[in-house]
Image (tube, rainbow, N blue to C red):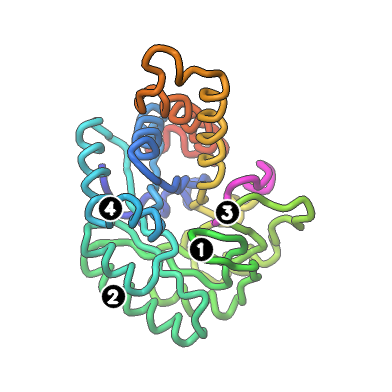
Amino acid sequence: MLVSAKEMLQKAKAEGYAVAQININNLEWIKAVLSTVEELKSPVILGVSEGAAKYMGGYENVMAMVSTLDKAMNISVPVAVHLDHGTYEGAFKAIRAGFTSVMFDGSHYPFEENLKKTQEVVAVAHAVGVSVEAEVGSIGGEEDGVVGTGELADPEECRIIAATGVDLFAAGIGNIHGKYPANWKGLDFGVLKTVSEVTNGVPLVLHGGTGIPADQITKAISLGIAKINVNTELQLAFAAATRKYIEEGKDLESKGFDPRKLLNPGYVAMKQVIKDKLTMFGSVNKA
């Protein structure tokens, strides 16, 4: 059931859990997420970076794959298809292609330009029932060539951007994309608490969900985080399971080289990571 992210996140915030955004990369990823959320009766957001959309044949093809599978697999839980870290142009392309939610990441622009462009994206998206995520303070690490050192968001800027009518809001609180280094200081809950207070109940987003300890996740949810993004962890699980299959020589046994067999261990490994995350975030049986 394809929907915008607005209602599912308002419900999550009100009831004290978080919805997982699982970034998708191909058919195996989409099937792994949809089959798992249906089993666990959990709402979900399928994150699509601009690089992943290009890899999968464009925004229209992503929507065709997801909507066809959603129907074929008889998915009953709420599923949003969300542009992750979208550019200004990318946000409009995704809306035209039928995405149900978009993130416009204007965090690298001067504040006034971020504000103006966010307002424009909100106006167009809301006219067609699409939810919008905005960001203040870049998230650290690297995602599809977008590198950020990780900033702590300015609460006043957060208040102004949140007032544009965005449906979900990402603020830098010491989180980073990818693996966390050994000397990582942890999430800044002081900044998160302030951001939560000034954004007037807008559901907050935690980027870089891979590797954040469970106790910090739980605390972040209690302070208004309603959406947590997961990407790297699934990629690592998929790669490790595929490596094991090949190292054990299973691709050389019978028709073990068939992609349907070769990619299955990675698919199964991803499903386990997704189950663990949905359980940790508290969204099981919340559809």
Q: Secondary structure at mark 4?
A: loop
Name the amino acid, label 1. Answer: Gly
Residue 37 lies in the magenta stretch: no
* Label 4 – label 2 distance at C-alpha: 27 Å
Q: Is residue 196 above or below residue 81?
A: below
Label 4 and label 1: CA atoms lie apart by 19 Å
In the image, residue 184 above or below residue 262: below
Q: Residue furthest right?
A: 183
Q: Earlier in the sequence, mark 4 or mark 2?
A: 4
Question: Where residue 257 sits: x, y (%)?
Answer: 39, 23
Q: Which residue is mark 4?
A: 57
Residue 208 falls within the magenta-colored stretch: yes
Up-down relation of residue 156 to residue 279 (above or below) = below
Mark 2–mark 3 distance (CA, rounded to whole Å): 28 Å
Between marks 2 and 1, how big is the CA–CA gap? 28 Å
Residue 97 coordinates in the image, percent (x, y):
22, 59
> What residue does disc 2 label?
123
Residue at 61% of width from left, 60% of height from top?
141
Which quadrant, please, contains the N terminus?
A: top left
SS state under label 2: helix
Residue indicated by mark 1: 145
Instruction: Give the left or right position of residue 156, taking residue 188 as reference.
Output: left
Question: Disc number at residue 202?
Answer: none
Q: Residues within 10 Å of mark 1 (few under 14, many from 20)?
A: few
Question: Which circle, 3 or 1, is nearer the viewer?
Answer: 1
Q: Secondary structure at mark 3?
A: loop
Residue at 44% across / 85% down in the picture? Answer: 113
Residues rendered magenta in the picture: 206-217
The kind of residue tagged 4 is Gly
Q: What is the crowding at mark 2: few (fewer than 14 residues within 10 Å), some, or many (at least 20)?
A: some
Q: Which residue is mark 3?
A: 208
Q: Amino acid at mark 2?
A: Ala
